[in-house]
Amino acid sequence: MTSPQSEHIPQEAFDWYDEYAHGLIDRRTFMKKLGGLAALGFSMTVLTGALLPNYAQAEQVSFNDDDIKATYQEFDSPDGYGSGKGYLVVPKNTQGKLPVVLVVHENRGLNPYVKDVARRLAKAGFIAFAPDALHPLGGYPGNDDEGRAMQRTLDRTKIQNDFVAAAHFLKAQPNSNGKLGAVGFCFGGYIVNYLASVDSNLLSAGVPFYGTPASESLHKNIKAPLMIQLGELDKRVNATWPEYEQSLNANNVEFIMHKYEGANHGFHNDSTGRYDEKSAELAWQRTLAFFKNYLS
């Protein structure tokens, strides 16, 4: 099911939020558009409560869960911003080498939802590392609006190189089995596609959630199997899929695409009204099975 408070909100509101979240309209325009729904009987409190993040809802695995250990780790990134920092979560009470998974946030920095995703992976037996692209600016500021504005000021090439450096850092962890997966959401989905494209030997599996593809000129480098996760109502990202699918086929890439009926962009993020519980849970179980198959 979808988030209860969002069940009756018109789809246009979710589309406007997507435009706002990706810089296509500013906050004033977004709020003005929402105000126009008042004639339909929606209060601004209900609308903003359904659309804007509530991170208290997003904690599925506590940071002090007995089965995991979470720390912040820095890594060198000479081709990016010099150094990076991220949230490393490892399973406790395990023996031997473990598969590793890079977790890549949306276009607003390392917020509580993405840290919880890293904890979920560790709980499932993976070593997970979630870098913060905003580290050069002091890190995620505590709210998504400011984080989104901060990330827009950063150089895209340097951000990409920071995530490449983070992937190498994670892959080289002492308890790593050398097989690296990557999962990302929105901007993070793009980064997963980029990591698979920029270095044939970097990833062993990638799961981009509603992310756009990397430059087509790089697709010939993709060797890692991909699981593409899309929401049916995500017009912006879905418009890029037909050409990406054609390119993946042309380059003999192993991939599977799942499109979730009635789901919006961001459907996995359980801190917002776009969350679709049924689709998110199915997508997550598929993600874990995909990683266990290719990273073990």
Image (cartoon, rainbow, N blue to C red):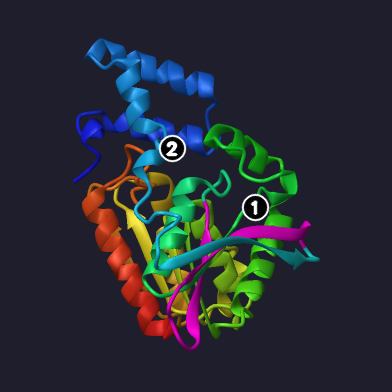
Q: Residue 165 is drawn in which quadrant?
A: bottom right
Q: Which mark is nearer the camera, 1 or 2?
A: 1
Q: In this view, does 45 lie to the left or right of 182?
A: left
Q: Nearer the viewer, residue 90 or 203?
A: 90
Q: Residue 138 is drawn in which quadrant?
A: top right
Amino acid type at circle 2 is Asp
Q: Residue at x 34, y 71 (%)?
A: 288
Which label sits on residue 107? none
Relative to 166, is 199 above or below?
below
Q: What predominant SS class does the magenta segment belong to?
A: strand
Tell me if I can see residue 141 in this picture: yes
Which label sits on residue 133? 1
Q: Which residue is drawn at 41% across and 30% down?
A: 16
The answer to whether residue 85 is magenta is yes
Q: How crowded is mark 1: few (under 14 residues within 10 Å), some or many (20 or more)?
A: many
Q: SS of the residue at dot 1?
A: loop
| Picture coordinates of residue 92, whole percent (x, y) | 45, 73
| Picture coordinates of residue 279, whole percent (x, y) | 25, 55
Which label sits on residue 18? 2
| Picture coordinates of residue 200, whole percent (x, y) | 59, 81
Relative to 296, is 35 above or below?
above
Q: Residues within 10 Å of mark 2 (few under 14, many from 20)?
A: many
| Quarter the C terminus occupies | bottom left
Q: In this view, does 232 lie to the left or right of 23?
A: left
Along the polypeptide, which appears first: circle 1 or circle 2? 2
Q: Residue at x 40, y 54 (%)?
A: 62
Q: Residue 38 is drawn in which quadrant?
A: top left
Tell me if I can see residue 251 in this picture: no
The answer to whether residue 220 is magenta is no
Magenta highlight range: 80-105
